[in-house]
Image: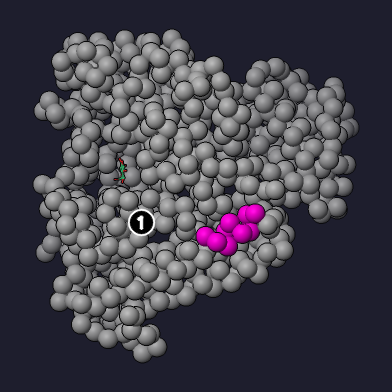
Amino acid sequence: AETGYELWLRYQPIANAQYVNACKQLIRSLEIKGTSPTLRAARSELERGLNGMLRINLPLSHSGSILLGKPENIPAITPAIKEQLSKAGTEGFLIKTITIGGKNRILIAGNTDQALLYGVFHFLRLIQTEQPVRQLDILSVPRSPLRLLNHWDNPDRTIERGYAGFSLWQWNNLPAYIDQRVIDYARANASIGINGTVLTNVNANALILTPEFLQKVKALADVFRVYGIKTFLTARFSAPIEIGGLKTADPLDPAVREWWKKKADSIYQLIPDFGGFLVKANSEGQPGPQDYERTHADGANMLAEALAPHKGIVMWRAFVYSHTSDDRFKQAYEEFKPLDGKFSSNVLVQVKNGPIDFQPREPFSPLFGAMPATPLMMEFQLTQEYLGQSTHLVYQATLYKETLDADTYTNGKGSPVSSTLSGFAGVANIGNDLNWCGHPFAQSNWYALGRLSWDYTLSSETIATEWIKQTFTPQPAFVQPVLKMMMRSRELLVNYMTPLGLTHMMYNDHHYGPMPWGNTLNRPDWNPVYYHKADKAGIGFNRTGSGSNALRQYAAPVQQQFENIDNCPDDYLLWFHHASWDHKMQSGRTLWDELCYRYHTATDSVRAMQQQWKSLQRFVDAERFSHVQQMLAIQASEAAWWRDACLLYFQTFSGKPFPAGYEQPK
Ligand code: GCU
């Protein structure tokens, strides 16, 4: 039975006989130049894929119809091709139909073995999605050098905000035992260009840096290296105290600096290509340099100094907030913007997409574009902490793109967030569930993160279409309706959870289900009422000049988009304004009526999605069909739960009846 274990690498026999025949004409044998574990992996993937999809064995041959190699190993290569490859860098690849001795061949070339592996995966993707392979000329170069997953996995294998089982890293059996799953994880990542993975939770303790654990990390790194994936770890700032026996972790203390240098040296002895550290410091109770009245830059630079001789990097997170701020929105910018230019060259600051915390819709973080002297990483969350976890069907590429495409205006018009980035991180949604991600459709968010990190100009539609074809079937009668479902899914969730710029109304702690009334935590900034501020007069958080003035953290044209209540886009209204219940929305409805309208139509649309899925049964294997069907039923009832909980609660302030056509819920 299909379990979803194969992800988008299913390589099912292709039903379209014409397409299969066309491929078979062109693909008969393989010539592979060079030997390395990575090339062996590339060859075995080609064999597996072509055998599965086209039922061909791929014998090696000196004039194989596929020619896989680096330019220096291919004497017949023309200057024009050399020229193309000179633009490919270390990771880009070329897939090109060439003629050698009158014979057409498919060249898959790149400047490194890793690039060749990427080329092979892309070639397989062409076939999986039934693209013509007769006249190929594809040069693909990643737009971003850092394309990482961040696992929030603890040493005890629980996963913070993980909804798909336990961690893949079997610390108890490592280093001696390598689970096949770890290899398949690496294959999946390589297939979408992910080239780094942070194995541990940003809140994890320092155990991972002990010699015993580092041996285990090495065993994983040895697997990942074959697939072009660098291994990273989180570094708990107080590690010198906890596992080093020092009295302080003060970043300016020479003994502390020495401890980190030695630690870094010992890691590189085991893992020569170790990537570096990800750090959460002075955030949500984690230790950090501010404990010693030092700055984030002091802390990051100390680690950077230890890693620099080995070419390692520090990714220092900007996710900070505290109860002393009048508006949590503002704090990351306030703490980090003044440090621009103060970080060592191998430090990146990693910023969540929005100013609060992975909400269904946030405006982009004002830090993007605001730190021109500091390389920034984007942090997206694949795991759906606030988006229905692994129960709700939400394709998040539309959310990612909305952020990436938003214009920061920090370099004049046409300075999208994507142009301010030096790397991408996705907080993984992967666990040891049979299907990796819990919800069968959650796999699409892992896929999308990889594809967008490689090329953020790809559209959400393109990525979803690829994913559907590979994961289910390329039949248009299936692809078209499922594409529509996916493309609307995130907007539906926004509208049945937190429409019009509402935010953070999820239940305390677990963040699942509605709790707009939440006001009992002793940290005001953890209470939902802090975010919506509903009262008799209206609802929403005033972040204009008459309120917290968070808006001034944006460039002037962005401020202008949001600051005037009369032309602030409906979708962001309550992010920036406390608007009256009678406020006239751009839709023409009053705010109260619009809220009712959004909650109701979104809930109805989830029911429509259920019906749509039901009509597609003939295209999907029984197990995955039923899994999605059951999840959609939960989602439909939970959308109604959100609708009723939120509207009934807000009605206690608005005092208004439900507009005509909507029944007053009980
Ligand atoms: C959220 C999440 C935490 C996580 C934190 C972070 O607040 O709820 O579990 O640790 O983000 O990104 O550090």
Quadrant where ligand 1 appears: top left
Determine the main secondary structure of the stretch shown in magenta: helix
Q: Position of residue 624 (x, y in %)?
A: 63, 54
- Seen at 16% across and 57% down, the residue is 520
Where 140 falls versus 18 (above or below)?
above
- Name the quadrant of the C terminus: bottom left
Quarter where residue 622 is shown = bottom right
- Seen at 88% across and 42% down, the residue is 25
Residue interval drawn in magenta = 623-631
Q: Position of residue 302 (x, y in %)?
A: 25, 20
The three-letter code of the residue at mark 1 reads: Tyr
- Seen at 31% across and 58% down, the residue is 506
Residue 481 falls left or right of residue 14: left
Residue 604 falls left or right of residue 128: left
Residue 625 is a magenta residue: yes
Residue 632 falls left or right of residue 320: right
Label 1 CA crowd tier, 10 Å (few <14, some 14–19, many 20+): some
Residue 162 falls left or right of residue 664: right
Where 359 falls versus 26 (above or below)?
below
Please, what secondary structure does the residue beneath circle 1 have? Answer: loop
Where 272 falls versus 50 (above or below)?
above
Q: Which residue is mark 1?
A: 512
- Seen at 87% across and 28% down, the residue is 101
